[in-house]
Image (cartoon, rainbow, N blue to C red):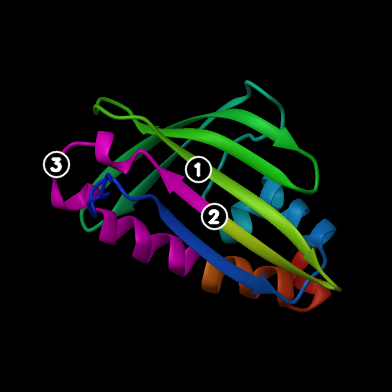
């Protein structure tokens, strides 16, 4: 029997959002909407092989993210590689959507974190906290908020 250590275990965040799948899918795949709740993406297309990037400043450091879409199943799943310019490591981020009446159950999985440098900035706990905030607060408020915030 193999036991996974904390360092190799994927981060999995699941939330039920009070919004239909089509609404959540648009928030996950439309560049304008993504800029409102996710990161400042210059361009994004939910197409296999599409590459996108963004930079985040956190705790005094800049992280240049490089991503490439690896899977798209409209209204159900989108996945992309996630790595950092100039750093070792390559991970995979997957968003899966499940209809739950007029709500959506979203599962985010971020795997491959153990391939990143063994530094505090890349600790699993940091990713877990970040994704919890992004999915449980930013995305949730965006898709559940008043229609006027979505235009």
Q: Give the range drawn in magenta.
A: 108-134
Quadrant occupied by the C terminus? bottom right
Quick one: label 2, few (<14), some, or many (20+) residues within 10 Å?
Answer: many
Q: Residue at 80% across / 60% down in the picture?
A: 21
Viewer-side residue, 31 vs 2: 2
Task: Say whether residue 129 is magenta.
Answer: yes
Percent from the top left, x then y, of residue 131?
44, 60
Percent from the top left, x then y, of residue 107?
59, 58
Q: Name the residue under label 3.
A: 118
Label 1 sits on a secondary structure element that is strand
Label 2 sits on a secondary structure element that is strand
Quick one: label 3, few (<14), some, or many (20+) residues within 10 Å?
Answer: few
Label 1–label 2 contact, CB within 8 A: yes
- Side (left or right) of 67 relative to 49: left
Q: Can residue 49 be seen in this view?
A: yes
Viewer-side residue, 39 vs 99: 99
Count of numbered badges drawn on the protein: 3
Q: Distance between the residues labelled 1 and 2?
A: 7 Å
Q: Residue at 74% across / 59% down in the picture?
A: 98
| Rendered image quadrant of residue 138 | bottom right
Viewer-side residue, 81 vs 112: 112
Task: Say whether residue 106 is magenta.
Answer: no
Q: Is residue 45 visible?
A: no
Q: Name the residue under label 1.
A: 93
């Amino acid at each position: 029997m193999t036991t996974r250590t904390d360092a190799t275990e994927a981060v999995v965040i699941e939330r039920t959002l009070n919004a239909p799948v089509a609404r959540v899918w648009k928030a996950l795949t439309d560049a304008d909407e993504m800029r409102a709740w996710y990161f400042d993406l210059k361009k994004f297309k939910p197409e296999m092989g599409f590459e996108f990037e963004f930079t985040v400043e956190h705790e005094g450091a800049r992280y240049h993210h490089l991503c490439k879409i690896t899977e798209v199943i409209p209204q159900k799943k989108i996945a992309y590689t996630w790595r950092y310019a100039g750093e070792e490591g390559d991970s995979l981020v997957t968003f899966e959507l499940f209809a739950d009446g007029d709500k959506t159950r979203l599962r985010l999985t971020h795997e491959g974190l153990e391939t990143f440098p063994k530094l505090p900035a890349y600790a699993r706990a940091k990713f877990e906290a970040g994704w919890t905030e992004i999915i449980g607060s930013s995305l949730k408020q965006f898709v559940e908020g008043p229609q006027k915030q979505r235009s």
